[in-house]
Image (cartoon, rainbow, N blue to C red):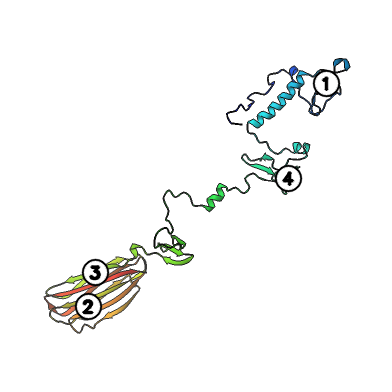
Amino acid sequence: MKQSDNLGIFTKIIAQNASAAEMSAVPEEQATAGDGTASISTGFPPETFLPRGAGGVPPRGQDMNGFLNRLSRATQVLQAGYIGPFNATFAAAIKGYPAGAVVSGLVPGTFWVSTADNNITTPGASGALWKSLFDGYITQTWADGQYQPLLNFTPVQQGGANGIGTNKTCLGWASSGSGRLHYAIDGLDQGDLANISDLPTFVVMGSSNPNTSWVSGSISFVAKRAGFLKLDINAGNDSGSRMDGTRTQVNVGGVTAVQGGGNTGATGLFIGSYIYTFNAGATVVMNMTIAFLNSSANNQMYASGLVCYV
C-alpha cells in the first residue's frame, strides 16, 4: 500500500440523506422473532434466507441502510484520527480492553495504554492497569532542568590540542562575592582566577624644591579591594644638611596598619621602606614633607611603590 493509493476515505456517511422510512436504527437484538428485522446479534435473521412459500421474509432495505450507515460512521471516526476516551460500558460489554489498547485522557493531549488483557480498570485510578503513552519519554520540563539552553556560540572545548590535558575543568563566577572567576580541576577547588585589575599598580611620588630647606609630595588612590602599598622613599639635598625631625611629617589616611621604617636622618640622606595595609573601598591619601636644617640649591624626594590587592 502507498499513500497515493485510493484509501476509501468516507467524506460522507452512507445513507446520510435517507429518510426515516428508508433507514432503520438496527437494534442489538431482534425485537420480534420471525418478522425479518435485522439486528446486531443475528445480522439478517434466518427467515430472510427462506422462500416466501416456505414462510420466508425478504430482507429489508431499511436494515441494510442502517448497517451501512453505522459501519461508515465508525470507519469515518477512525479515518479522522480520533482516539476515544475510556468507556466503562463498552469495556464491560467486550469483557475489558486488550493489552496495548490506547484511549485518550481527560486532559487533551494525554493518552493511556492498557497493560493487561480484559482490562476494565479506569485509567489514572489507583492500581489501574494503564500507563501513560508517554511514560519514559523526556518532557520539556525535565529537559529544562537537565540541559543548558542553546548558547548561540561555540563553547570552550576541553582538550583537543597538543599540550592540553583531558582533566575535567569547571569554571564559573565565584559564589563568595569576590567578583572573580572561580575554577576547579577534577573536582578539586583551585581558587579564584586573577583579573587584570588584580595586578600590582605602580605609584610614584617625585618632588624637587631648590633654594629651600624642605621638599613635599602626595599620593592618593581608592582601593578596589583589600591590599597593601609597598612604598620606598629616598630624600636628600646637595648641602649635606641633616633632616629636621620637627618639620618632617608623613600623614597617611585610609590605612589600617603601617610596617617598616627608615634611617634616623642623621645625615643629609633619608632612606625608608614601608608597607601600608588598607581595606576594600578605602580612600588612601599620603602627604609627605621632608625638611632639612639648612637651605640647599637642590632638595629632592622620590617615592615609588606597588599597590597590591589580595
Q: Residue furthest bottom?
A: 266
Tell me the amino acid under the disc marked 4.
Answer: Ala
In the rendered view, tell whether residue 1 sits above or below residue 265: above
Residue matched to label 1? 49
The numbered mark, 2 or 4, whose residue comes first in the sequence reads 4
Give percent across and percent down for residue 141: 56, 49
What residue do we see at 41% from left, 64% from top?
178
- Left or right placement of residue 111 versus residue 31 in this view: left
Label 3: state its secondary structure: strand
Q: Earlier in the sequence, mark 3 or mark 2?
A: 3
Q: Which residue is mark 2?
A: 248
> Is disc 1 in contact with disc 3, using a CB cutoff of under 8 Å?
no
Q: Position of residue 299 (x, y in %)?
A: 15, 75
User: Disc 1 vs disc 4: which is toward the camera?
Assistant: 1
The picture quadrant where one finds residue 22 is top right
- Cβ atoms under marks 2 and 4 closer than 8 Å: no
Residue name at image x 72 percent, y 24 percent: 68
Q: Is residue 79 visible?
A: yes
Residue 116 badge: 4
Distance from Cα at disc 1 to Cα at disc 2: 136 Å
Label 3 vs 4, first from the N-terminus: 4
